[in-house]
Amino acid sequence: MKVIKSLKIAAVALAASAVTLSASAQDNTLLGAGSTFVYPLFSKIFAEYGAKTKVQVNYQSIGSGGGILQLTNKTVDFGDSDAPLNDEQAKKMGAPVLHIPMTSGATVITYNIPGITKPLNFNGKIIADIYLGKITNWNNAEIKSLNRGVNLPDLPIVVIHRSDGSGTTFIFTDYLSKVSPEWASKVGKATAVNWPAGLGGKGSEGVAGLVKQTPGGFGYVELAYAVQNKMAYGNVQNKKGKLITPTISSTSAASNVELPADSKVSLTDTDNPQGYPISGFTWALIYKEQKYNGRSAGKAKEVLKLLWYNVHEGQKNCAPLNYAPLSKSALKVAENILKSATYDGKPIL
């Protein structure tokens, strides 16, 4: 019981890197780790689920890369990532892993310009050129051309990015790779990249904190973090030429796509004229075969029941926290994936 108590304390402190997690804990304690993108939503759902079922869910908000590593090491019951596993990551897992869509959200462009409260407008080229270190000042002509009537100051842009392996970074760099050939060739898309410019912050919390405390700061975070922290965030021009404000509605428009059977799909640079162009799904990750590391059938069933709750009753928490609920077609895909999970070769649900 001392081990379980220490894990609960660590979860509150979010000190995941200093904790050795154990997926063999008793059946009414489930361990997860990964995406900071989805953390505000998971916190609400898991607290609600615990109150209803007495099942304690300890989720470590350590970034998608950390969640993938913890699942690879089989030290958690589930991971969560805003990027699907790549071939190398899937191979390291050593067994098939299921991707269950949980929700979709917007990655927003946030900034700290003293005296500017009106939402600014950006396009893909400007965003990419700022992160490439080519646009370095807020009164740059290209920024001013999209923001006529705004008195942009002669202030250096302080570029801020994630320092950890991040699914939010994957969504962001996936978008930049689509809208900027130079970014695609020089940097590319991944959960962690060699940033041409800027300061690194750990987690969405770290990026939000750095932008807030840095005059001239410019970064990217999930919409929920920007709203909760009362941060300024901008409109982004989509491929149809429309300036789109990141909202639940515009995120839903971007995510209104037919998911493949494995649910792995990119939502960035959407064709939907009403869609926000830097949107993405987040996926819960579990092993398809749940009998491993001495896990009980009871533990496996509790994991599946939790994720089933997430994509059903838990969806009511999405909109109040600025996430887009799963569409009916996405929910159907999620259900089919969950039903494919097995214990000793037999379906769990």
Image (cartoon, rainbow, N blue to C red):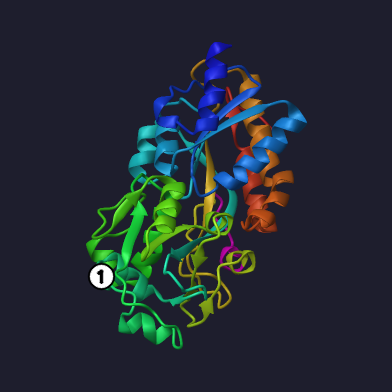
Q: How many marks?
A: 1
Q: Is 173 situated left or right of 286 in this image?
A: left
Height in image: 164 above or below 326? above
Where is residue 26 shown, x and y percent of the image?
61, 17
Q: Identify the image quadrant of the N terminus.
A: top right
**Element marked by disc 1:** helix
Q: Residue at x 66, y 34 (%)?
A: 306
Q: Residue furthest top?
A: 1
How many C-alpha atoms fall within 10 Å of the one at disc 1: few (<14), some, or many (≥20)? some
Query: Which residue is at the front of the view, 317 or 255?
Result: 317
Query: Which residue is at the front of the view, 182 or 56?
Result: 56
Q: Which residues are magenta?
A: 253-261
Q: Residue furthest front?
A: 115
Q: Residue furthest right?
A: 52
Residue that numbered label 1 is attached to: 182
Q: Quadrant of residue 122?
A: bottom left
Considering the whole magenta stretch, tell me its main secondary structure. loop
Query: Which residue is at the front of the view, 160 or 345?
Result: 160
Query: Which residue is at the front of the view, 52 or 339?
Result: 52
The reply to whether residue 142 is in sight is yes
Where is residue 349 shown, x and y percent of the image?
69, 33
Q: Residue at x 48, y 63 (%)?
A: 108
Height in image: 147 above or below 99? below
Where is residue 114 shown, x and y percent of the image?
43, 69
Where is residue 299 shown, x and y percent of the image?
62, 22
Residue 300 inside the magenta-drawn segment: no
Q: Residue at x 44, y 51 (%)?
A: 209
Height in image: 74 above or below 204? above
Q: Which kind of residue does numbered mark 1 sit on? A: Glu
Residue 257 inside the magenta-drawn segment: yes
The reply to whether residue 347 is in sight is no
